[in-house]
Image (tube, rainbow, N blue to C red):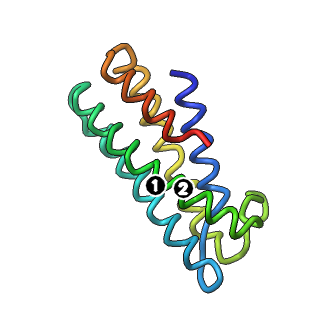
Amino acid sequence: MRKVIVMASIAALVVVTSGCGGGKYDDAREVLDTQCEMMSDFAVGVENAKDSAEIVTVLEKFQKNAAGAKEQMMAIIEKYPEIKDETNPPEELKAQKKKMEEIGPKFMGAMMKIAKDYGSDPAVQEALQKMQKALQP
């Protein structure tokens, strides 16, 4: 479980460090907006889940979306290596970085809820492992 949380943190960090803006970074903004939405949907889905079956559904949806999002983000980072510097993102990317900083704790809170409330369920464990694989670089 700890490994999954670490991998989710890394994914969130990659997203946070790559914010977006306008002009030169329009494609990056689009990718970031998609990732923000994906992470927000995940947090809301976990919050609203009533049982482990619903948690598995949320995890599977996130895992499916994360695979494509990871590829897009890696391409954006390759295209714009300067966005790796989370302490000094390009001006055009600061709004997206702020949005990710707001969503990050909600995402991590959802991961903690899964670990605490559903972590012993075998189906949840399996879905978490699949999600972990999807997030690995």
The amino acid marked with disc number 2 is Glu
Give the secondary structure at mark 1: helix
- The residue wearing badge 1 is 68
The outermost residue toward the bottom is 23
Q: Is residue 89 left or right of residue 108?
A: right
Determine the CA span between mark 1 and mark 2: 5 Å
Question: In the depicted view, which residue is nearer to us: 117 or 85?
Answer: 85
Q: How many numbered marks appear? A: 2
Question: In the depicted view, which residue is nearer to us: 62 or 94?
Answer: 62
Q: Residue at x 58, y 45 (%)?
A: 11
Q: Residue at x 40, y 51 (%)?
A: 65
- Percent across and percent down for residue 34 are 44, 63
Picture quadrant where residue 128 is located: top left
- Percent across and percent down for residue 85 are 77, 59
Q: Is residue 59 left or right of residue 12?
A: left
The amino acid marked with disc number 1 is Gly
- Percent across and percent down for residue 49 are 25, 35
Q: Residue at x 39, y 27 (%)?
A: 114
Q: Is residue 127 left or right of residue 134?
A: left
- Examine the rendered structure and indicate whether residue 20 appears above or below residue 63: below
- The residue wearing badge 2 is 71
CB contact under 8 Å: marks 1 and 2: yes
Q: Residue at x 25, y 39 (%)?
A: 48
Question: In the depicted view, which residue is nearer to us: 56 or 78?
Answer: 78
Give the secondary structure at mark 2: helix
10 Å crowding of disc 2: few (<14), some (14-19), many (20+):
few
Which quarter of the rendering shows the C terminus?
top right
